[in-house]
Amino acid sequence: MNNSARRVVITGGAGFLGSHLCTRFLDEGYEVLCLDNFLTGSPTNVEHLLGREGFRMIRADVTDFVHVVGPVDMVLHFASPASPIDYLQLPLETLKVGSIGTMHTLGLAKEKQARYILASTSESYGDPQVHPQPESYWGHVNPVGPRGVYDEAKRFGEAMTMAYRRYHDVNTGILRIFNTHGAFMRPKDGRAVPTFIRQALRGEPITVAGDGTQTRSIQYVDDLVEGVWRFAQTEHPGPMNIGNPHEVSMLELAELVKELTGSSSEIRFIERPEDDPTVRQPDITLAREVLGWEPTVPLQEGLHRTIEWFRVHPELLGG
Ligand code: NAD
């Protein structure tokens, strides 16, 4: 390997977003060290990278400890259960990776004098009372509701990240990522896009929570990766929203997936989960100004690509 290559540690690198980030940083000439305990991710998500020069994957739980030999230029902390089904089933793991895992990875960045990126989330805004959500909004989160394990872990992670910046001079950056979709999502992770696509492709009822008027803003993964890449190159502390301001209701999304898949599935309304946010839309003024970034993949095009990925992986859609 080229001795002057820059080196990035990506925690959660075998997950949905992590796998795309591993690919991007390798493409940019980085050595990539992927740390993952495969709690919600899988080595198959990075199988295609295993033969590439500069890529290493290590099974590691970042809540135990994080030790890396040699220089590190960047640490991207993406490890965490991220879908409602996952974090409701794994509440303690979620709290631990957002708190202890964040502390350990910040410690690594401090030791190596590396740029540190925390993958925070739009869930930091909870069920927002300000719309769209700018970074200056402090949020509306129920700490004792079922989703609190995720939202509060991320909010704690943000506070910890700022403490390392203020008191240890670590070059940190917080990203608040909005709903993202694309290849390597798991069709049964409970998030709206893969759920609707799986149901539509299997000809099963497409299940919309509540009356489907609640909104989300979903971005295609390529846009997210571009945003992370640009943000990582700066020294900006964030928090910075990365998401697509194009807002759709869940019912519109279900109808769009039905149309794009050519499915004859019926749309069925089911009970709405507790504390499910009513609206969600990023204000991306800051990302536009600082990174010159904005999403470039329209909703229909992104959905089309994700649907095609699921079509060529029918084994994932089973039973
Ligand atoms: P994912 O579940 O596909 O990936 C998370 C990865 O972290 C998995 O590979 C999992 O095995 C790993 N992991 C979990 N706990 C770990 C631990 N203790 N040690 C090591 N590895 C561990 O989820 P994703 O959608 O790729 O999300 C990645 C990150 O981005 C998360 O931090 C999530 O909160 C954040 N995020 C994602 C979205 C989105 O729409 N996908 C939105 C906002 C924020």
Image (spheres, grey):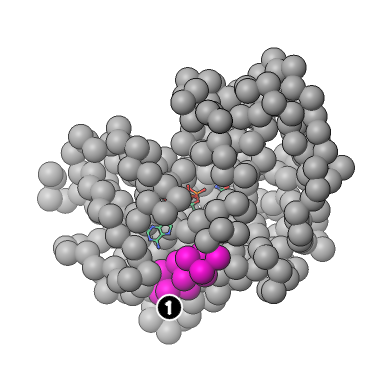
Give the residue displayed 39% in from the left and 78% down from the top. 169
User: Does the magenta portion include 95?
Assistant: yes
Which residue is most to the front? 319
Residue 194, picture quadrant = top right
102 with respect to 253 (left or right): left
Give the residue displayed 42% in from the left and 74% down from the top. 100
Span colored in magenta: 91-103
Which residue is most to the bottom? 167
Residue 28 in sight from this viewpoint:
no
Residue 22 in sight from this viewpoint:
yes
Q: Position of residue 29 (x, y in %)?
A: 26, 42
103 with respect to 256 (left or right): left
The amino acid at mark 1 is Tyr
Q: Position of residue 77 (x, y in %)?
A: 42, 60
Q: Nearest the camera: 215 or 71? A: 215
Q: Circle 1 — which element? A: helix
The residue that disc 1 covers is 164
The answer as to whether callout 1 falls within 8 Å of ligand 1 is no
Q: Is residue 298 above or below residue 99?
A: above
51 with respect to 192 (left or right): left
Q: Is residue 74 above or below residue 152?
A: above
Give the residue displayed 70% in from the left and 53% down from the top. 283
Q: Position of residue 273 (x, y in %)?
A: 75, 54
Quarter of the picture holding the C terminus: top right
